[in-house]
Amino acid sequence: MSKDTLLVNYACVAAFKKRYYGRVLMREHVRGGMVRFASGSISYPDGMKADEDLWGYIIEKGNVKYFLESKDSDGNLIDYRTVMPIFGEGLVPFSYRDVVYHQVTNPVPAVLKPNKKMSFRQFVDKLACLPHTNPKHQRLLWFIVLTQMMDRANFRVCSPPATGKDSVVATVGNLLGNAATITQPTIAKLEFRTTYKLLVINEAVNIPKSTWENIEFFAMEVGDFRPSIEKRSRSTEDREVLDVADFSLNMFYNDVDTFPRCGDADFEFFEDKVPEAVVNRFMPIRLYGHYTHDFNEIQAINIDEFVEKHFDEYRSIVSTFVHFKEQLFDIPVRWEMSIPETIPGTHQKFPERWRTNAQKLLRVVQLYSENEAEYKAWEKVLWDAVEDYHTMLTFQREITRIKESMSSKDFHELRASLKKFDTFKQKLAKVKRSNDTPDYAGLTQWGGQ
């Protein structure tokens, strides 16, 4: 049993969040953008009515609704992102349209001060300490998520099941707050969650094409790094604008060959159902590997006692993150970033928005790297992962084509034989050998066309 692996166990970090953030109101608790409560509909327990309209933000935690005014006591406008997290002090209850809110009249800052308790490398290694069959991809995933928490960036991450995508986001959400996943999104659900720092659309391939038609503008505008977007989920006379200047969006989904219908002519993968404008805004990275850790070790400890004993170490992790988040753009870029002109493994031009996101990611990778040689090795890990994603698209086209010429028995045996390979370069080579197909390297197009 290892103390380090227990520190990042989901049950322990969840217990830490409950204790550390128990009384704290965070930006993830804010529900939508600024709202106006008309004075005539506001009532106080003593029967008095409000003298003027209230402008501010609805905050919901547990079963309690709070209200934070958009101006401070001096009349200055408040951006909730700059004042939160807070302790909700000086609560004044009132009713608005038969719903009870607790107005926060004294928002006390609950921010842990930045304090570099460890190097960035030690910080990442502590978070990525769980034994994994592919430590490089495990850390690359952490680099991606931390980039989105420290900066504003957008990605797509594809992998086999159990690679650890969801657990990384859950760990970040519990330790640092303001990170979450969502499945089967609607435009209303997405807009509702723009108060998070990082939102992940999970199982993105399972989203129907009709839903993508409704949410594509949201994804496009966020992918364009627009500071604000117009709310579309509700038609009102007043134009409501959502502040997304600090919002990061990711999309998680599983490899194409994990779907039972892979090989069917009418099977649609991500590029087949998502508009090209969205595809071109979110750089895809294909990871593989899985945890080898025995998570049942948690059964042998008292979780609350463990968290209590190591509470200062958790605080050190959080304060170190705050330090590097605040210092990110003050730390000079040490080595030249090599970003390809064409998408690795293809002849297609590397999209500009991918380039922007890659630069943000590589800045964080440089924080971790001890020297230029190590950094360049990490660049290769990244570009190999991008290339393997596009090899997967070629694989999808090829396995669909050869299925027509194979018996059902032979096709299922072929698919079973592919499970032993980690990369799609290996899988594609096996498919070619099984059917003597020509080499399609470098010809990948969106959707395998």
Image (cartoon, rainbow, N blue to C red):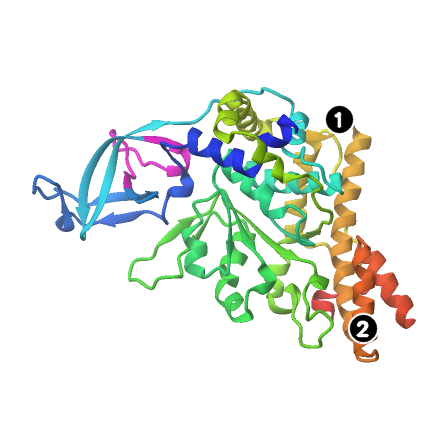
Q: Residue sitting at 48 percent across and 59 percent down?
A: 185
Residue range in magenta is 66-87
Q: Position of residue 262 (x, y in %)?
A: 71, 69
Residue 348 visible, this angle: no
Q: Position of residue 281 (x, y in %)?
A: 61, 55
Q: Residue sitting at 89 percent across and 69 percent down?
A: 434
**Helix, strand or loop under label 1:** loop
Mark 2: few/some/many CA within 10 Å (<14, 14-19, 20+): some
- Tag 2 residue: 411
Quarter of the rendering containing residue 374: top right
Amino acid type, residue under disc 2 in the picture? Phe
Tell whether 55 sits left or right of 13. left
Amino acid type, residue under disc 1 in the picture? Glu
Q: Residue sitting at 79 percent across and 66 percent down?
A: 415
In the displayed structure, 317 sits above or below 239; it is: above
Q: Position of residue 129 (x, y in %)?
A: 67, 33
As for residue 287 lying within the magenta part, the answer is no
Q: CA distance from mark 1 to mark 2?
A: 47 Å
As for residue 72 lying within the magenta part, the answer is yes
- Tag 1 residue: 370
For discs 1 and 2, the disc positioned in front in the rendered view: 2
Tell whether 425 sits left or right of 221. right
Q: Position of residue 412 (x, y in %)?
A: 78, 71
In the displayed structure, 372 sits above or below 410; it is: above
In the displayed structure, 271 sits above or below 362; it is: below
Outermost residue toward the left in this view: 47
In the displayed structure, 198 sits above or below 240; it is: above
Residue 168 visible, this angle: yes
Front residue (pair 416, 54): 416
Disc with the residue nearer the chain's start (1 vs 2): 1
